[in-house]
Amino acid sequence: MKLEPVVKNQSAPRKTWPRWARRGIQENLAVALILLGVVMLVQPFSIVLYGYSFVTVLVGVVMFIIVSKFPE
Amino acid sequence: MSSASTTAHSVVEPSANSKRLAGFLVILYAVISMIPLAWIFATGWKTPPDSISYPPKVVFDPSLEGYCNLFTTRTRQTQDYIEAQGPPQGACDEVTRKREMVIAGPSNYVPRFINSLIIAFGSTFLAVALGVLSAYAFSRFKIPLADDLLFFILSTRMMPPIAVAIPIYLMYRELGLSDSALGMILLYTAVNVSLAVWLLKGFIDEIPREYEEAAMIDGYTRLHAFFKVVLPQAATGIAATAIFCLIFAWNEYAFAVLLTSGRAQTAPPFIPTIIGEGGMDWPAVGAGTTLFLIPIVVFTVLLRKHLLRGITFGAVRK
Amino acid sequence: MSDFNSIADRAAAATPPAIARKVRGLSDRAIAWLFIAPTIVLLLAINIFPLIWTVYLSFTNYASNRPNRPVVNVGLKWYQDILGSPEIWASMQATAHFVFWTILLQTVIGFGLAYLIDRKFRGHAFWTTVILIPMMLSPAVVGNFWKFLYQPQIGLFNYIVSFFTGIPPSSFEMLGSVTLAPWAIIIVDTWMWTPYVMLICLAGLRSIPDYIHEAAEVDRASRWRQFWSITLPMALPFIMLAVLFRGIENFKMFDMVMLLTGGGPGSTTELASIALKRQAFEAYRTGYSSAFAIILFVVVFGLANVYVKALNKVKQR
């Protein structure tokens, strides 16, 4: 009762984490956000998009850092 | 890059004609890309009027004036004053007098060049020393969060220099390190250590662990094994890494121009400030550039087998 | 190396390694941290501490030429200013123009050269080394001497162009004209960094095992098909690596362009780093430029993450 749950929790995430939360997909999403933010930063069409570019990159970077700790 | 990699290209060996065409095109590109360098080298041996003549002079009488102007400062004098000086002493004196000038003293090129040497070698030594220790630890031991630490180390090299320069400028002003060789050495060490760790980790990974383990069974301590077994085995890698660090520190401009102004100024910010009477003194610039670039060309040739590793932080080894 | 003669050796061999190591001095764990600590401390002092300071400054009105003025917290004002500023936006577009064209030209020429060098003609090793020289040179010194080549009347570049096209050499100024200056910096960067892309592409081409081409040859796939369905896809991770790194480097380009045009004429070649330098070291708007620096830093940091991902992908090959 005391030890078993701890052991189980360590290996459990591998199996129970939903597919969308897997590292690969999430990491690609983060990369896409970063690249989208960079494109928004340098595009010559809309200053509104330019205004939101930094936030987009920042979210992508933070997400990348968090997601890289997820199991494969 | 070595011809040793010509392995069994049995079926797909290119035909002799396609080889000849490939060779022709590559050599054509190489020759064209060398023209700017050849031109700046030639300009160093021209007289100022030759350097700005139209059409550009490919054939010219070589003159020492560029090199003389690089190493000296000169003042304009009257004909009478120059004649009163007696016979010219040395080739530079003669060249200078033809322009109705006399040599006033040495220029700043030599001190700047020496600054470059001190800062480049100082920072390279520190970066490689720190780098080889860290690389060994990352290569041989299980370190918690090793990947994150390695990425952190690499990301410091990716920072835009101008973005880092603002706080460093303020910090050095507080610490009294602005325009000092020590400050520049520390800064370049910090930039280079990331490259050193990544490159050397690759080299040390390639040395079999068994060597140290055998040595440790023979009674060496871990530290002993590191110094007596691993370091000699990694000598080539250490040399290649050192050359990469040297070239970076030698070439660096952004930090140098923002953080140094006199005492500790290196050659790259100095060369563009060489001016003669009425505009740039291009032969002197050509001479200064030639002397500055020769060491890099020599190092590039020495490094050619390791260049690929160096530019990919040790990831691509071929 | 290991002859088990003395009793001491035999005893040492019999002891479990973990205990033996502890007895013989520092433990592995202690050595590991002892070896890593100096590097980390240096990076914290020279890189991370200044970075945190920059974040702090970006929320204040501090100006480095007026250190005695009381420092006021301005919140996100500078970030809003920069992200609504048409001038900074224009500098980002100038940067994008520069990055896009340099990468395109360098990838096409670099890959082409690598493909040709991979034919392994006689002397290819020597000529490869010659081609690599420009990328090792100091960007500042390169910028400075290209300024000489670009001189309108006397410069070699204008002379060669006029020799081949018949346009009078003094009729155009590469560095003085608003339309030509952005291309002048692209030409120099391409001259300098095509070898870099070439070298990585060459590694990519050489990583393709011969048996794949041999199999395709047996299947009588045409050279053209082989190129599109084998050579290019298999070299692609390497090309991506080169493109990403050149992208990051050129996004923060400073030295070469600073020496060549200084951002001019007007602000046509004022790339992000040059705009930042003007704000920080000419206008002394330290708070504003700190916010600008953080924006650039976050973008580069994000791209560096992507780069390391690509690097690991290539490493697995």
Image (spheres, rainbow, N blue to C red):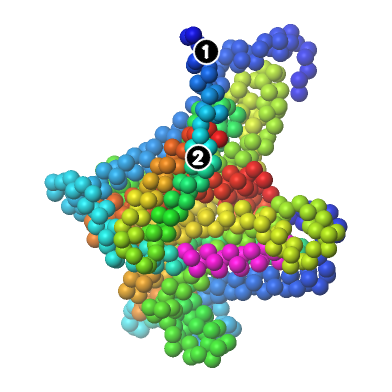
Q: What secondary structure predominates along the stretch shown in magenta? A: helix
**Residue B84 on the magenta segment:** no
Give the image quarter of residue A65. Answer: top left
Establish if B47 lies above or below C124: below
Where is residue B57? Give x, y as percent: 55, 84
Q: Is residue C147 left or right of residue B171?
A: right
Establish if B285 lies above or below C21: below
Element type at marker 2?
helix
For the point 62% across and 47% down, the residue is C314
Residue B267 in view in this figure: no
Range shown magenta: C99-118
**Label 1: which residue?**
A4
Task: Tell me how far mark 2 sits from mark 1, CA to CA.
Answer: 28 Å
Residue placed most toward the observer, C301 or C140 = C301
Q: Name the amino acid, label 2.
A: Trp
Q: Earlier in the sequence, mark 2 or mark 1?
A: 1
For the point 36% across and 55% down, the residue is A53
For the point 71% across and 10% down, the residue is C14
Where is residue C107? Give x, y as percent: 58, 64
Where is residue C131? Give x, y as percent: 63, 65
Are discs 2 and 1 both within one chain?
yes
